[in-house]
Amino acid sequence: MGILITGASAGLGAALARECAAPGVTLHLSARDASRLAATVAACVAKGATVHPVGLDVRDAAGMAAWIAGAGRLDLVIANAGISAGTGTGMEAPEVVRDIFDTNVTGVLNTALPAITAMAAQAPGADGLRGRVAVIASIAAFVAGPTAPAYCASKSAVQRWAEARDATERKRGIRLHAVCPGFIRTAITDRNAFPMPGLMEPEMAAQRTLAGIRAGKLRVVYPWPLYAMSRIIGALPPGWRNALLMRVEPKAAQA
């Protein structure tokens, strides 16, 4: 089985790689800095997987297309790489907003579109599919948060794109999945000064992500209580929602 994961050096991406690692599995892992992949690679090799790491920025469209086209058979591609800018006034300078959209939207498309092209040329696997593409969005996709507008909008864009594109790709034997996690414990969330309901470890998030993909869910969302809360808040009149969310303590900027 061939699996490709972007942003695999830490957090959910690294946990997904470790969870997928097994004898007979070939993992293609990327991160902007190849040296940061070393720990993930070692853990996956120890579990019996064959691992091909690469230092590559998802914003590099030509580089991503070449990498994916040369990977061989891919049964699952996970577009995981993403960034945030923290929350609060002043966190979204113009250049930061562009970086967020370039990584979280364009970077996802630079991963998913070549993967779909490659999968369309593959023979169906044992499950009858040519392949699966999972896009890591966020529960933030369902709330237009005024303290992190670019992040919320970028995650909403890829969530909606994946869910809509799945309807047509199914006809070619390719499935798409929009993965919308809540709070996951990472070096970034460790600096948050506000409550994070449903906070989970990366390993648990990876397990829930992969279980949802295996079950064929178009929208893989967790935890449910936070999802329900986000849908309620997202349904409020915009003025009410903004007034409520502007009272949340700011989040530190991403390093």
Image (cartoon, grey):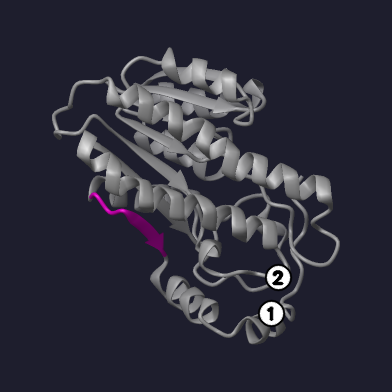
Q: Where does label 2 land, which residue?
A: 146
Is 81 or 249 nearer to us in this picture?
81
Taking the image as drawn, is residue 209 in sight? no
Q: Residues within 10 Å of mark 2 (few under 14, many from 20)?
A: some
**Of callouts 2 and 1, the N-terminal one:** 2
Residue depicted at x 56% and y 44%: 11
Secondary structure of residue under mark 2: loop
**Image marks 2 and 1: residues in contact by CB distance under 8 Å:** yes
253 lies left or right of 231:
right
Q: Which residues are magenta?
A: 216-222
Q: Residue at x 77, y 58 (%)?
A: 252
Above or below 37: residue 235: below
Residue sitting at 72 percent across and 42 percent down?
A: 99
Work out whether residue 30 or residue 50 is closer to the camera in this orientation and state it.
30
Residue on which disc 1 sits: 242
Quadrant housing the N terminus:
top left
Report the number of numbered marks: 2
Q: Position of residue 167 (x, y in %)?
A: 28, 49
User: Is 184 within the magenta?
Assistant: no
| Residue 215 visible in rendering | yes
